[in-house]
Image: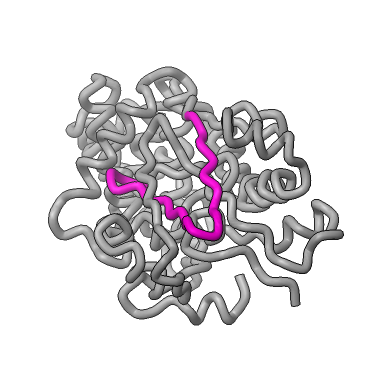
Amino acid sequence: MNRREANSHAAMLPAGVDAPVFAEPWQATAFAMTVALHDKGLFSWSEWADALSAEVKRPGAASDGHDYYEHWLAALEKLLSAKGVAGKGDVDALAAAWERAAHATPHGKPVLLQNDPSPTEGRGGRIG
Amino acid sequence: MSHDHDHDNELDPFAARVRALETILTQKGLIDPAAIDVIVDTYETKIGPRNGAKVVAKAWVDPDFATWLKRDATAAIGSLGYTGRQGEHMQAVFNAADTHNLVVCTLCSCYPWSVLGLPPVWYKAPPYRSRAVIDPRGVLEEFGLTLPATTKIRVWDSTAELRYLVVPMRPKGTEDWSEERLADLVTRDAMIGTGLARVPA
């Protein structure tokens, strides 16, 4: 897109015409996991569109769309919970374990789940 | 990827939840982390509006292909190697002197990934999704596109099953141009309908 086109977008529509499609690596991973799970036949794309639609239609969605992948992730979590693949409690506990593991990992080293200093909390101890 | 500030290893809550899901899904054998990387790479670098531009340019120079594209866009586009992963059908909508086409997904963000890549941020945001249907002419003006009052605007609302590709009008003065050169005139916005094909410099 050239500058003339980029400048032609007025204030009411969101800026960032040429913003990268993923702002953070986790957004790309959430997107790709959804595509992979659909390929695997875990859900139809219509099921996915319904789940995503329910999330993006909630009041309070940002008008600039920056929270789009937060809605995407919420939709994926709900769909996986409904399918009995990953319950909210399991995801909560494992996410907390990942946060502890990240905090305990020295800067510059890869974050591994086994770096979690309190693996007995939640499910962390049984993973990895 | 935008984390350029200095920080210790901290995962924000969204990143941690994605790691948690990835761990569970990998353990259950539902995903393969290496395949996840391939999907990301494909959508970030290999699939994009250049695919759609080639479809449009071919339709401009090859009347038989244009007819096929009008009748069965899924097959015509598939013949160039661009096939959707979600089993969606494609429909090509052709701009004409008296009709301009505009694509939206009011439901969520359904988009013809195989020919345009992933949607731009504004396509997924609430203002465009709600206003494209209510006030298409006003939305187009915000994109810098003012159409004559006599031009009819048709708005196509995408679904999970059916996605649309706008075929813009071929710019004047390009009669002897090659397909490749023509493809450079076809922008992403022109194929969504929020713009026109570029005019030769």
Q: Nearer the viewer, residue A69 or B51?
A: B51
Residue A8 drawn above or below residue A71: below
Residue at x 63%, y 47% (from the top left corner)? B52
Determine which quarter of the picture holds residue A85. Answer: top left
Q: Residue A58 or B1: which is nearer the viewer? A: A58
Name the spot of residue B29 as percent of width and height, x first.
45, 19
State the image coordinates of residue B66 (x, y, percent, origin top left): 67, 39
In front: A51, or B4?
A: A51
Q: Is residue A66 magenta?
A: no
- The answer to whether residue A117 shows anywhere in this view is no
* Residue A29 against residue B29 in the figure, above or below: below
Location of the C terminus of chain B (image quadrant): bottom right
Q: Residue at x 39, y 62 (%)?
A: B122
Q: In x, y percent, where is residue A71?
A: 27, 48
Q: Reply above or below: B57 against A38.
A: below
Left-right relation of B46 to A121: right
Region of the chain picked out in magenta, as a range: B89-109
User: What colour-coding does the image apply?
Assistant: one colour
- Going by the image, does A109 lie left or right of A46? right
Return the x and y of residue B45 as percentages of the image width and height. Answer: 64, 50
Which residue sits at x=34%, y=62%?
A: B136
Q: Is residue A19 left or right of residue B126?
A: right
